[in-house]
Image (cartoon, grey):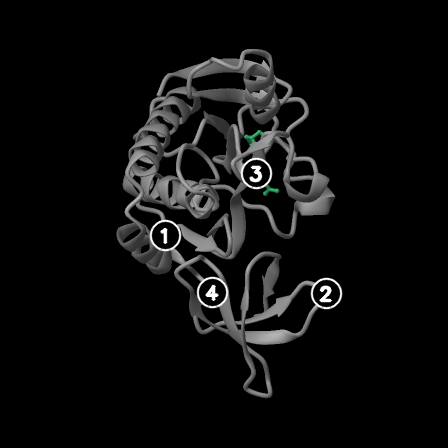
Amino acid sequence: MKIEFFETIDSTNTYLYGKALDKELCEECAACADMQTAGKGRKGRSFYSPQNTGLYLSFLLFPEMELDKIMMLTPLTAVAAALCVKEMTDLDIKIKWVNDLYLEGKKVSGILTESSPYIKDNKPSFVVVGIGINILPPKGGFPDEIKDIAGALFDSLPERYDDLISFKRDLAQRITDRFYTMYKDPSRERFISEYRSLSMLDGKTVSIVDGPVVKVLGIEDDFGLKVMDDDGNISVLKAGEVSLLL
Ligand code: BTN
């Protein structure tokens, strides 16, 4: 899949979404930026994307698979990115359900998936999946709102890498290649076992946002989070957010 590189853009997701809306026949492709002026996060939040800090990468897809497989695109991106970061850096990256990447208790990456406004045969006509990875902390640190949660892969770039731009390009290419291979042949068994071995919540006590404190039992085959409350009631969360209790 071809990657278009930008120094600055509003948002790689917005760019590819607009491209798909404007030119219905454009091909599946990727966009990567060194900084975003209007980076978007989940739930209408913004995603802090300053220069010399992170990798901002999005994929435009025209999935022909069934809806249940389309729903796997976000965790698939998390697995592809986690494996590529591990391969390049040896860092102990984990996935925090459902699609954030964590390193030593801090969120270093998030994913935003957006679907086309049109649905045909119960499927979106296109999907944009975007991932942001904090490679270095921003100059002056993360903004107050996220400073307790956000982290970066490194404090400073290890000497074995020439410079941040070439590190980012290499990482973007690896994630794109791995993601696209998995996307074209999503073997659920292999992929779910990779997801499970990267998952950081198993056996942990978490608090469901706007809900109770529960113990995590594992990840279901459809990526639901199986949890048990204090009374022993077992349920499966299909979406939402949980926070890890120390
Ligand atoms: C989140 O954690 O809330 C999701 C963050 C997703 C950020 C990425 S950066 C590349 C792409 N472009 C965007 O505007 N957002 C996604």
Label 3 sits on residue: 112
Left or right: where 60 falls relative to 172: right
Q: Earlier in the sequence, mark 3 or mark 4?
A: 3
Q: Alpha carbon of mark 1 to alpha carbon of mark 3: how far?
A: 22 Å
- C-beta proximity under 8 Å, tags 3 and 2: no
Kind of element beneath mark 1: loop
Q: Earlier in the sequence, mark 2 or mark 4?
A: 4
Q: Amino acid at mark 3?
A: Leu
Kind of element beneath mark 2: loop
Q: Which residue does the image show at 53% across and 15% down from the upper left?
A: 24
Label 4 sits on residue: 201
Q: Nearer the viewer, residue 198 or 166?
A: 198
Kind of element beneath mark 3: strand
Q: x, y percentage for residue 71?
A: 48, 46
Q: Which residue does the image show at 42% across and 53% down from the upper left?
A: 94
Left or right: where 223 falls relative to 12: left
Between label 3 and label 4, give the one nearer the viewer: 3
Q: Alpha carbon of mark 3 to alpha carbon of mark 4: how far?
A: 21 Å
Rendered image: mark on residue 229: none
Q: Amino acid at mark 1?
A: Asp
